[in-house]
Image (cartoon, rainbow, N blue to C red):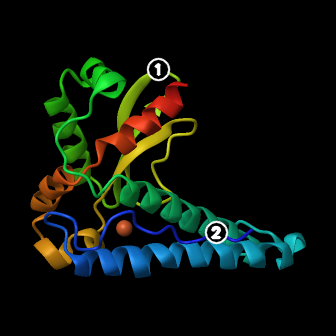
């Protein structure tokens, strides 16, 4: 079954400090583009000549490489848009307790993820790693870079320029401040509860 573009659960002009123009370009065109390309690749893969697969260049290699780029582009954007649309503040319950345990305080957590966002060329993703039972921020310079196998993403900060340049120019730190004001923590709490379950 082909992948489908997930609609936003909030109005495109509902965010504080992230404009409708940015959301239209980001969600409706860029994110949708990854979904469409993933479907295109899925349809092309069965027809690719596997007997010619080669690491230097082959049609099969090109498709497999871009499969992860577009799949991760889809998945990370769906995560990102799903937990926007809220009013920021703080999480509560088990998620807050885990964050305080792993980072010292919620403020330290925000500072860490924000720093990861400043240091990255693509994504700062918050994930629960079952190998140590902790929440981490992981840096990804591209959709298909920086993923840690087995770690379950809970939330993500898109720091590609397309996420903020129309609203903030080069002032990425201002965009990251706006990002935190729009988090719907109930979405992240639910993701964490599923992971712990
Ligand atoms: Fe993006």
Whether residue 141 is visible to the viewer of this picture, yes or no, is no
Name the quarter showing ligand 1.
bottom left
Quarter of the figure with the N terminus: bottom right
Query: Which class describes the residues within 10 Å of circle 2: few (<14), some (14-19), or many (20+)?
Result: some
Asked if disc 2 is less than 8 Å from ligand 1, the answer is: no
Question: What percent of the width, then of the height, locates residue 2?
Answer: 70, 71
> Which residue is found at the position 86% from the left and 70% from the top?
50
Q: CA distance from mark 2 to mark 1?
A: 33 Å
58 and 23: which one is in front? Answer: 23
Q: Secondary structure at mark 1?
A: loop
Of the pair 37 and 23, the residue shown nearer to us: 23
Mark 1: is the Cβ under 8 angstroms from ligand 1? no
Residue 149 x, y percent position in the rendering: 57, 39
- Quarter residue 71 falls in: bottom right
Identify which residue is drawn at 18% across, 24% down: 105
Q: Is residue 17 visible?
A: yes
Please state if 163 lies on the left or on the right of 144 as rendered: left
Residue assigned mark 1: 132
- Dot 1, how many residues are within 10 Å of its Cα: few (below 14), some (14-19), or many (20+)? few
- Give the mark, 2 or 1, whose residue is nearer the N terminus: 2
* Apparent side of residue 164 relative to residue 47 in the rendered image (left or right): left
Return the residue at label 2. 3
Residue 150 x %, y %: 57, 35
User: Would residue 78 be found to the left or right of residue 17 on screen?
Assistant: right
Q: What SS does tag 2 mark? A: loop
Towards the viewer: 113 or 5: 5
Provide residue 104's location: percent of width, then percent of height.
20, 20
Does residue 91 lie above or below 176 as drawn? above
């Amino acid at each position: 079954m082909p992948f489908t573009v997930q609609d936003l659960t909030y109005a495109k002009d509902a965010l504080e400090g992230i404009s409708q123009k940015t959301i239209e370009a980001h969600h409706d065109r860029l994110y949708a583009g990854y979904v469409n390309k993933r479907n295109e690749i899925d349809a092309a893969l069965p027809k690719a000549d596997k007997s010619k697969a080669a690491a230097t260049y082959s049609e099969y290699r090109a498709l497999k490489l871009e499969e992860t780029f577009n799949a991760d582009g889809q998945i990370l954007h769906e995560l990102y848009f799903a937990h926007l649309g809220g009013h920021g503040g703080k999480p509560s319950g088990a998620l807050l307790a885990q964050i305080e345990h792993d980072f010292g305080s919620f403020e330290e957590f925000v500072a860490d993820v924000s720093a990861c966002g400043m240091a990255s060329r693509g994504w700062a993703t918050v994930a629960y790693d079952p190998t140590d039972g902790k929440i981490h921020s992981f840096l990804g310079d591209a959709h298909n870079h920086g993923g840690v196998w087995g770690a379950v993403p809970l939330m993500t900060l898109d720091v590609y320029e397309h996420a903020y340049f129309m609203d903030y120019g080069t002032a990425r730190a201002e965009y990251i401040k706006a990002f935190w004001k729009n988090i719907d923590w109930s979405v992240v709490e639910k993701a964490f509860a599923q992971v712990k379950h």
